[in-house]
């Protein structure tokens, strides 16, 4: 059984990593792979705010159009968060 020799680290720190990435791949190399997570965050935010707004509208309709109390606003936010937890 042989031992594997440890290799020197590729980067000496975050700044060194950014410099080497920009030098070898251009500025776009710093943003490589950001598309899919960004699309996921857009979908998550859309679900959260749509659900929150629909629940607020339903509560206001039930209360005759009166503004929501803090507790009712909390419920609307919790419902939005619940939907996001299921979608995510």
Image (tube, rainbow, N blue to C red):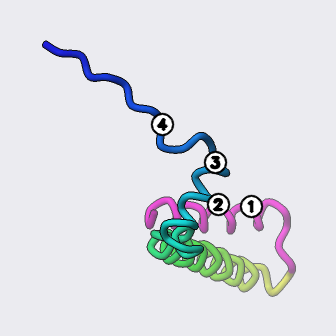
Residue at the image position 80 percent from the left and 85 percent from the top: 64
Please name the predominant secondary structure of the magenta segment in the image: helix
Q: Is residue 11 above or below residue 18?
A: above
Q: Position of residue 49 (x, y in %)?
A: 65, 77
Whole-Å distance between the Cαs marked 2 and 1?
A: 6 Å
Query: Farthest residue in the top direction?
Result: 1
Do the residues under discs 4 and 3 have CB atoms within 8 angstroms? no
Mark found first going from the N terminus, 2 or 4:
4
Q: Between 66 and 55, which is closer to the camera in this rendering?
A: 55
The picture quadrant where one finds residue 80 is: bottom right
Residue at the image position 26 percent from the left and 22 percent from the top: 4
Q: Which residue is mark 3?
A: 14
Q: Which residue is mark 1?
A: 74
Whole-Å distance between the Cαs marked 3 and 2?
A: 38 Å
Whole-Å distance between the Cαs marked 1 and 4?
A: 48 Å
Q: Secondary structure at mark 1?
A: helix
Within 10 Å of the Cα at label 2, are there few (<14), some (14-19), or many (20+) other Cα atoms?
some
Do the residues under discs 2 and 1 have CB atoms within 8 angstroms? yes
Judged left or right of residue 39, residue 57 is: right
Q: Position of residue 32 (x, y in %)?
A: 48, 70
Q: Secondary structure at mark 2?
A: helix
Q: Which residue is mark 2?
A: 78
Magenta residues? 67-88
Do the residues under discs 1 and 4 have CB atoms within 8 angstroms? no
Judged left or right of residue 73, residue 8 is: left
């Amino acid at each position: 059984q042989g031992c594997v020799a440890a290799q020197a680290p590729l980067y000496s720190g975050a700044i060194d990593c950014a410099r080497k990435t920009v030098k070898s791949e251009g500025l776009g190399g710093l943003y490589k792979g950001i598309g899919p997570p960004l699309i996921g965050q857009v979908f998550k935010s859309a679900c959260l705010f749509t659900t929150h707004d629909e629940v607020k509208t339903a509560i206001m309709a039930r209360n005759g159009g009166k503004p929501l109390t803090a507790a009712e606003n909390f419920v609307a936010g919790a419902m939005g968060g619940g939907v996001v937890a299921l979608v995510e």
